[in-house]
Amino acid sequence: MLATATTFTIEGVRGREILVEVDVRSGLPAFNVVGLADTAVREARERVRAALLNSGLEFPLKRVTANLAPAYLRKTGAAFDLALAVALLAASGQLPPGALDGVAVCGELSLSGEIRPIRGAIAIAQGARERGYARLVVPVQDAPDAALVGGVEVIGVPSLQRLVALLTGRWTPEPAQPRALRPQPRADGPDLADVRGQPDAKRALEIAAAGGHSLLMVGPPGAGKTMLARRLPGLLPPPTFEEAVEIRNIHSVAGLTRLPDPGERPFRAPHHTVSAAGLVGGGSRPTPGEITLAHHGVLFLDELAEFARPTLEALRQPLEDGHVVVTRGQRTITFPARALLVAASNPCPCGSAGGVCRCGPVARRRYEQRLSGPLVDRIDLVCELAPPAPLALVDEAREESSAAVRERVLAARERQAARLRGTGLAVNAALDGPLTRHHVRLAAGAVRSLLDGHGRLGLSGRGHDRVLRIARTIADLEGSELVQAHHVDEALGYRLPPALSEAG
Amino acid sequence: MTAACCDDCLRRGHLLGLLAPRISGALARREAPAGLLALDDADLVAAVCASPQRRAEAEAFLDRFEPGAARAALAELGVEAVCRHAGAYPTGLLELADPPAALFVVGGPERLRALADAPAATIVGSRRGTPYGLEMAEALGRGLAAAGLTVVSGLALGVDAAAHRGACAAPAGGALAVVACGPEHCYPPANWAVYEAVLERGCVVSELPPRTPIFRWAFPARNRIMAALARITIVVEARDPSGSLITADFASQLGRDVAAVPGRAGAPHCAGSNALLRDGAHVILDAADVLDVLFEGSGPRPEPPPEPQLHDERLRRVFDAVDAVDTAPEIAELCGLSASEVRAALGRLEAMGLVRRGGAGQWTRKRT
């Protein structure tokens, strides 16, 4: 007798439908799994056998053949256990005919028959909805996440016995409730008020947060670069529901044990020894890289000059496109990668520019050359940090809180959203050349500022548009519809130093 | 064209190239007598060749030296030798106790003669110049060349290179680089662009023949030539001790003027140049000060650049703070302005061409 169950596997950050066919017929007792299954999938035979017997069900002493379709796709992991078990039950007549119609089943079995949690429940639920399944069975721990995706009835099931009860109609549970996503930003996160001084960097962070502009912080060790970068997610508006679901999905697919709080944006700070595949995603079974894990959040590259150059170059295209395309074998997988880039660097190899720097001119030039490159050329804002002043550390002066800055950022973002309605864009940083010139209206004095910039600073076309976009954001922060001369001036002040720029 | 170098001097020049490693060894063993380079050929060989074998080698070289072949080899490299008996030889060098017998020149003896005929100023300083020091060196090089002077320096990194760059960017004047290796190749290689710019309008000269590598003793020897070539030696940012101070020392021994650009008191990177000022060196704030020293105010004096008219109070305060401190946060602190005001002012000043920024975000006033 033949039966088919449906399950889902993860491809990139999306669910992909897999059909599990089980054929049971007379012959020498055997259990074979075919269809490009890896070791973990083939071991499912032992788990399924033990789980069935321990749940008081029957394991047929017949010739059992299971096929995972489509057969060309390599299957990995233990999430096929549950589908294999129910298909076997249906094929051996232990489930009524039609019990598996319109149901997708995902879960890992323990020998006792309990169902263990899996990765990527949200992606699986999205896949089930797209393929038109009415009902999705997932481990009970994953049900609240899977239920975030509407349009499919999610049932959380703790054990194989319960699942059989469900499929035979003896148990009729309520569909799982979606996990509550807190819309408020968390109040106990790192706060900007913890950082004493550094008004220049704080201002740059505010502009970066308001317009989605990438940022490079240059400053001596101990000035608080990392501390400031960690506070950037808290300056951004809290993620929308869709963004929060997307963030949670990516982190769940990647198998991270600590998923981000629903109200917070991810902050990823990969170490500078990270490989290109680790940063943008890859591997023989493509997994998301750091830039994808930072999707809708902040990607922080500390000690930018220490990163391998090919690694940084790999980052350039994703940052521009907002997604990564990984091609492995016959498959091409797209990962989302819309992250705000923040980088930090020492001013010179010894770490302290100015009076006490002990670096030779050659070493300093080499350091600048290591920093410069196509990636740095795409950084919008460059700010400097002062060395930490001992007085400022004990200063009791009230520093502005993250909440106060976020207010202004939110107001500026609303203004941008209103202006960009219909373009599908949200922030000034995303404007391309024609849109920039269309949306950035310059006051008379600002035109002169910009012309000076062309003449004396040798601004390139790209540099020109970049200054306009940043000036637009600064004007948005100030609530001005017209971009004034001092907005352009300030944008010019945050330009990349010529020594670090390749294109000028 | 007449031969610019007599056979004996040519032989002496090449002998120095042959003995360069021996001199190094003798100095390391502290066996070298004072005034080594003033000795005649035989005494020099005797003084620096420790083993009889080395001595025989050097004597054989002297005996078998073929001026014709040597000249042909030089011509192939585009190098010409000018000896102290030739008209193109800079007369200032003859005041030295140990003038180089021959100078190996890239750029041609005629050009060297023109460069030596004009009044010359030597600009030297730290290889690790601060942005301020480099700006000053470049502005001095440019201003002095524009006034028709020959700007002499040593083609080292930092201040030297900046002075050469300034001189080469000027509408007039000449650039003369004195190097401590063979003149046909650029040391340090990172300065190749400066090397080529100098050759566009001036000469690169050396006491040592082509293909001589770098030896430590050759630097002070080169410094004596730089000091003797010019009527004034200007030190921009020197540590203490430093090669630039050796050059200044030679200059004062020759009775030439010594001058320095003031730096921040107590800062180690300009301790040497500041010490010169305390000891009575001329204070140099711009190129016109140099001309005042040389011509006692009677020479060609260019108009000093007008102080920029900054009507905006904020711009003026920020402009005044640039050079006093380096980075934007420090400027904000000094001026008591907000971060965004300082950024706007810096952006404006940069667009006006009054300030510039370095790779690590240090802001300096623009002088050239």
Image (tube, coloured by chain):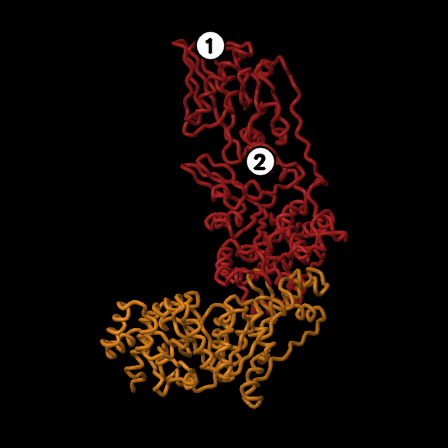
Chain colours: A red, B orange
Residue B240: name its quadrant: bottom right
Label 1 or label 2, whichever comes before in sequence order: 1
Q: Residues within 10 Å of mark 2 (few under 14, many from 20)?
A: many
In this rendering, the answer to whether B350 lies above or below B90 is above
Residue at 56%, 80% (x, y): give it.
Answer: B287
In this rendering, the answer to whether A418 lies above or below B210 is above
Q: Nearer the viewer, residue B92 or B131?
A: B92
Q: Report the amino acid beneath label 2.
A: His
Name the residue carrying label 2: A251
Dot label at residue A74: none
Please give the chain letter of the residue carrying mark 2. A
Q: Position of residue B332 (x, y in %)?
A: 69, 62
Q: Report the amino acid beneath label 1.
A: Pro
Instruction: Indicate the secondary structure of the residue bearing disc 2.
Output: helix
Residue B204: name its quadrant: bottom left
Q: Nearer the viewer, residue A460 or A149?
A: A460
Q: What is the spatial separation of the Cα atoms under label 1 and label 2, in whole angstroms?
A: 39 Å
Total tally of numbered discs in the picture: 2
Name the residue carrying label 1: A60
